[in-house]
Image (cartoon, helix red, strand yellow):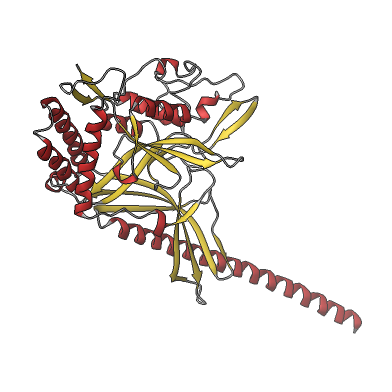
Amino acid sequence: MNTKFRMFLTVFIVLVCIFSTLKIVHTSGQEGVKQDLIVTELSNVLKEWYYGVRSTSFKNITVNVSQANDIQPVKIGDGKAEAVFYVKATMIPKATLEEASQSPFLKGMQRYLNENKTKLTPAQIKTVELAIKEKYDALKDMVSKLHEENGTFKVVCGITSEGTIDKNSVKIFYDVSVKGEARWEDTNNSFVSSTFTYDVEEKRGYTEIKGLIEKLYSSNVSANPISPNSVYQNLYNRTNAKNYADLYTSEALQSKTITCWINNTPVVSQYTDMSYWNNSQYPLTKYSNGYYEQLACNNCADFVSQAMYYGGMAIDNYWNPSIRKTGFGGKWCWTFVPDLTDYMVSRGDWSSCSYNSLDIGDVAVFWRYNQYGQIERYHVAMDDYSYGYYGIYYNYFAAHTNDVKNHYYDSSSKYLYKVSCWRFTP
């Protein structure tokens, strides 16, 4: 009996183990299926939300959403779900050429001209007219043009007892970092357009052109006062600068990396795809150890300088592609963000502006607090898409290290500058 009992017990234990294993595999499979369903639901929620946000100002919208496991794997547990996604969208502005010509901002600029024609010299009137034309050209350039947007989002929600997402609990966050360590902000705060009334827009146009004329024709501009009979022209072509920026960068994934030799140490730069860079005109040294020079991993200012140069920005001894790797006078105005910023501001070619005053070809300088609690300017990007009709504003940027293209950024933690190159003919 004891022998038979032991045999029976052994068989029973074996069967229990087999069925337990089968149950675990089955449960794991079910959880896998549920996870896929939840991720799909989250993806669809993000897609619908994105479409809704953009449908006010754009048409022919397509939104492609892909899971960003390289940033963060999906998290499901404790009645909650969380997933990170890349969004790549395309769309066409609804605005027409007629709406562009009737822009309240343009109306404000024109009002300034009409009210001051008797006070302005013919040369100053011509300068105002050139500024109005530049603004109108920027507005009409966006009409009927396909626009691309890129961004990284996190969707968080509760899970129902049936294992589906609770749509009422969904929260969507946007990564406002420079594609480094993710910094999530609620899209209700960071991913919304700025809206102004017609009157406010009209006043902004009036104020901007008034400020420009006062700046250009001020007797304090230089040691040699500018003649009121000199016509100013903006040598900076925003469209050319923007086109260069878009051509020589990409929306690189985290897996795209290069390694630089900095202070005798290899340093990896993620989100960097040099295959898009203008390596023929602006080569970067690759050492015998296989690592790149430091400039390759800190290339944001170099990239913005290249784009501005292509746009017609005037060169001099301090800002010049020929001294890109050597600097001049102890300054690195072509490749170092603080030096570039300070020099362009001192030259009068960069002027502080609001987020809603940005146009393509303008720049954003990113700042943060360092370990000593001091502000440091560490990154610069060029505005490569600026949508602003009837007070609704969106701004997108192109940059290197980390590489972005048509990437949305809000105004937080940034110094914003309007770029121009107004020069006069005596």
The percent position of residue 393, horizontal first and vertical second, equals 29, 49
Question: Which quarter of the figure is the N terminus placed in?
Answer: bottom right
Q: Quadrant of residue 153?
A: bottom left
Judge whether residue 237 can be spotted in this image. no
- Tally the marks: 0
Up/down of 351 relative to 183, above or below: above
Could you tell whether 123 is left or right of 45 in the image? left
* Residue occupying the far bottom of the picture: 1
Could you tell whether 389 is left or right of 8 in the image? left
The percent position of residue 197, horizontal first and vertical second, equals 22, 55
The percent position of residue 126, horizontal first and vertical second, equals 13, 28
Could you tell whether 23 is left or right of 44 in the image? right
Q: Quadrant of residue 381?
A: top left
Could you tell whether 82 is left or right of 219 in the image? right
Judge whether residue 266 can be spotted in this image. yes
Up/down of 107 relative to 279, above or below: below
- Of residues 100 and 87, the one nearer the viewer is 100
* Residue occupying the far right of the picture: 2
Q: Residue at x 35, y 55 (%)?
A: 192
- Of residues 413 and 406, the one nearer the viewer is 413
- Of residues 152 and 384, the one nearer the viewer is 384
Question: Which quarter of the figure is the C terminus placed in?
Answer: top left
Q: Residue at x 39, y 47 (%)?
A: 411
Q: Residue at x 21, y 43 (%)?
A: 205
The percent position of residue 13, horizontal first and vertical second, equals 78, 75
Up/down of 357 relative to 80, above or below: above
